[in-house]
Image: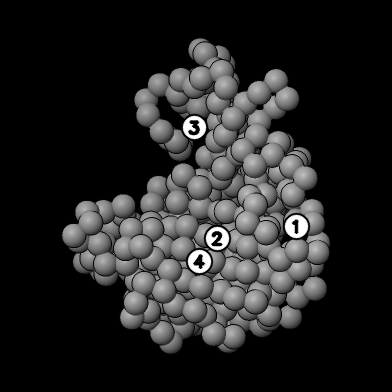
Amino acid sequence: MTRLFIISLLLWLPSWSRGEVKVSYLVLEPGDSPSRQAFYRQPVRIWGDNYLVKPDEYHALLTLVNGKCLFAFHLHGRLSPEGPANVQLGMVRPSHFNWYAGNFLNLSQDGKSLTDGGFRLLEASSSQDSGFALLEFQGPDGGQLRLELPENDDKLQLTFTPRCRTLPCQATLTAYPGAYGTPELRQRLLLTANRTADSTEMLLEADECWGLFADKYYDCAEGRGDGCCAFLFNPRNTSRALLKTDRYSCQAILDYIPGQDIHIILWDLKGWSCQQAREYLNSLIITLE
């Protein structure tokens, strides 16, 4: 099984005090419950002002925070007597834009969604070295998703282990870089280390292991937008990797070969210009194993 590792960074980053990586998982219950008051006390707002949900709705807030950054996720789906199901995962921090706050990750096999069945949180762990949450999608074609944030790091490590090991698995990442924006002003950019897409699609080559989503108009260099976002993966684990945009959303479609776990590293580069982000990614020394 191949994985990917970042060996060293050639870009100087400020030092941060070492401390525990804290992970929390808070479920919002219907009505005027204590959980609703707990949601009001969170530093992250998911939506609206009142946090009132229907009895058949499931909403939860997952946060991973270290001394450097905060990742927050809104999990939402159906709620039945058997428990939550059809749960989707939106990233709402570091930025409410960039990785999609509604559902930034789609997982499928043979055209079927792997997140359509039941759902449960298996573990949420805080420690000095890293914090992680382990989520289980319980359908017959489900699997386990691990989200991990190391200490003194700003990269989210994502691992999905599909239950079925004989079929290829597809991971689709969705982003709205910088801002949702005005249609006539948006100028979405799909970038790799040496290329910028000249159309709405770009098939990644065998030696291209990261992609960057940005917007030419909603760029922090111009004093607009909320930054950009990027991902890193191991091309050796995939049969195809495609970047595409409909000039509103941007997507990375990664087709994994059978038997492979999905390993992806994500950056939400809130406050970064496109140029800063590309220079940073090009400064990484990456070894694929």
Taking the view exactly as shown, the residue that stands out farthest to the left is 184
Q: Residues under labels 3 and 4: Cα distance?
A: 31 Å
Would you place residue 79 above or below residue 176 in this image?
above
Name the N-terminal-most of marks 1 and 4: 1
Q: Is there CB contact under 8 Å for labels 3 and 1?
A: no
Name the amino acid, label 1: Thr
Name the amino acid, label 2: Thr
Name the N-terminal-most of marks 3 and 1: 3
Q: Position of residue 282 (x, y in %)?
A: 48, 82
Name the N-terminal-most of marks 2 and 1: 1
- If the image is split into quadrants, where does the C terminus sit? bottom right
Q: Residues within 10 Å of mark 4 (few under 14, many from 20)?
A: many
Q: Nearer the viewer, residue 190 or 115?
A: 115
Badge 1 element = strand
Q: Which residue is mark 4?
A: 252
Q: Is there CB contact under 8 Å for labels 2 and 1?
A: no
Tell me the quarter of the picture where residue 28 sits: top right
Q: Which residue is mark 2?
A: 172
Name the N-terminal-most of marks 2 and 3: 3
Q: Residues under labels 2 and 1: Cα distance?
A: 15 Å
Q: Residues under labels 3 and 1: Cα distance?
A: 31 Å
Would you place residue 236 above or below residue 212 in this image?
below
Tell me the quarter of the picture where residue 247 sits: bottom left
In the image, is 186 to the left or to the right of 268?
left
Q: Residue at x 75, y 57 (%)?
A: 161
Name the N-terminal-most of marks 3 and 4: 3
Would you place residue 124 above or below residue 240 in this image?
above
Q: Is there CB contact under 8 Å for labels 4 and 2?
A: yes
Q: Which residue is mark 1?
A: 161
Tell me the quarter of the picture where residue 178 sits: bottom left
Q: Which residue is mark 3?
A: 42
In the image, is 279 to the left or to the right of 162?
left
